[in-house]
Image: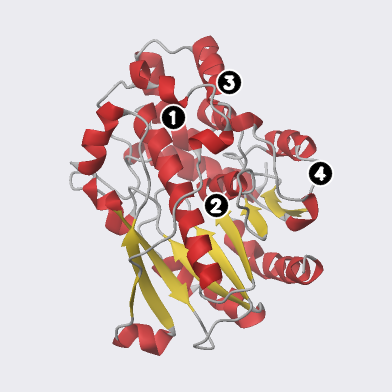
Amino acid sequence: MGYGRKLDQVIGGMSRLLHLRGAKQNTLPDLDPYLDREPNELFPEPPPITDMKVERRLVDKALKTSTLSWTSSHQTLCPTYERRHRGEYKRNLTAWARWIRPERQVRPTCLIYVHGWLEPGSWVEEATLFRAWTRELPIDIVHISLPFHGKRNPPGALFSGEYFWTADLVRSMEGVRQAVCDTRSLMDWLRGHGYERVGVTGISLGGALTMITGCVEPLPDFIIPIIGHLELQDAVEHAPILWRMKHDLEKWGIDLEARTKLFERLRITNYEPKLERKKQLWIEAREDVYIDAKMVEKQWKRWNTPPIFWIDGGHMSFPLAVPAMTERIGQFLEESK
C-alpha cells in the first residue's frame, strides 16, 4: 500500500470525528423533481449577474486580490425546500468569490477554481496553490465559494460544508445545482469583463462540479477537473469520508439495491460532455481512496478518453504533485488555444 492510500484512509477514518450527527430530514419523498431529468433541465442557463459588488480592502490591494459578491440566481425545484432555502439557509442567497489578478489588470485567460468539500475558505489555496499558478501560468484566478461553505455556512452547522453532501438528498441536489449555477453566472460575468478565455477547474467535489459545467451550454472554454469523477454512487458506497451519508440512507431503508436505482435515476453519473475532448485535461491520482482510479477510467472511456495526467499518491497527498500539475496545466493551456 502506497503512502497516498494510507493517508487517505487515516483522514477518512478521522472524518468520523466531524460527522457526529446525521441529516435531520428524510427528503426522499420529495425527490421527484430531480429524477429522470436531462442535464439542461437540472442545470438551466442562469441569467446575467446585475448586482456584482467588487471590494478591495487594504489587504486586497497588497495581495492584488478582490472580493466579489452577488445575488445568486439559483431557483430551487422543490417547493418544500424553497422555504428552507430562503429561511434557515438564506446565507446561500449571496454568492462569494475571490479574484486574484497579479498584474492588476485582466490577462487573456481566467480560471474559475471550485474548491473541495468541507473547505472553510480561500486562504489555503491563496497562500499555496494560487501563488504557484499565477506565478508560472498566464492566468488570473477566481476562487468561488460553494453553498454551505465559508461565508455561506448557515448558523447551527458544526463545520463548513456539513450540510452540503448528506442523506438529505433534496438539500444535497440543490447544493450541487446552486454551485453549478453560481459558477456559470460567474463565467458569463468574467467574459463580459474582458477575458478572452474562461475555464473551470476544481479539486475533489470541485472536480465533479467542473465536469458538470462541461455537459451544459453555454460551455466554458476548457475544464481541468482534479481528482474527481461523476461516479456518485461509487463514492457513497466506498469513500470513507462519506460513511455518514451511506449510514443515514440505510437507516431510512435505502439499501444497496435501492441506492443503485436512485442514483441511476438522478442520472448525473451518465452525463456526457458537450465540450470537446481536446479542451479537457483530467488530473487524477492512482492511489486515491475516495475517487477510485477504476471508476475514473470508466468515466474517462465513456467521455472519449480526453487528455489525462496521472499523479503519484492519493487524494489528500495531491499538494506534493503541484509542481508537476502546474507544468502539465501550462502545456495544456498552450495546446488548447
Pointer 4 residue: 305
Give the label, 1 or 4, closer to the camera: 4
Decide which of tag 4 and tag 3 comes sooner along the chain.
3
Question: Are circles 1 and 4 on residues that touch, CB within 8 Å?
Answer: no
In the rendered view of the protein, which quadrant contains the N terminus? top right
> Residue 240 at what x, y percent from top left?
49, 34
Tell me the tag on residue 264.
3
Whether residue 307 is situated above or below residue 9 in the rendered picture: below
- Callout 3 environment at 10 Å: few (<14), some (14 to 19), or many (20+)? some
Q: Amino acid at mark 2?
A: Met
Question: Are circles 4 and 2 on residues that touch, CB within 8 Å?
Answer: no
Q: CA distance from mark 4 to mark 3?
A: 22 Å
Decide which of tag 1 and tag 3 comes sooner along the chain.
1
Q: Quadrant of residue 89?
A: top left
Tell me the tag on residue 243.
1
Compared across the picture, whether 238 is left or right of 58 comes to right
Pointer 2 residue: 316
Question: Are circles 2 and 1 on residues that touch, CB within 8 Å?
Answer: no
Give the label, 4 or 2, closer to the camera: 4
Q: Element at badge 4?
A: loop
Q: Element at badge 2?
A: loop
> Residue 166 at what x, y percent from top left?
38, 32
Q: Amino acid at mark 3?
A: Glu
Decide which of tag 1 and tag 4 comes sooner along the chain.
1
Decide which of tag 2 and tag 3 comes sooner along the chain.
3
Q: Element at badge 1?
A: helix
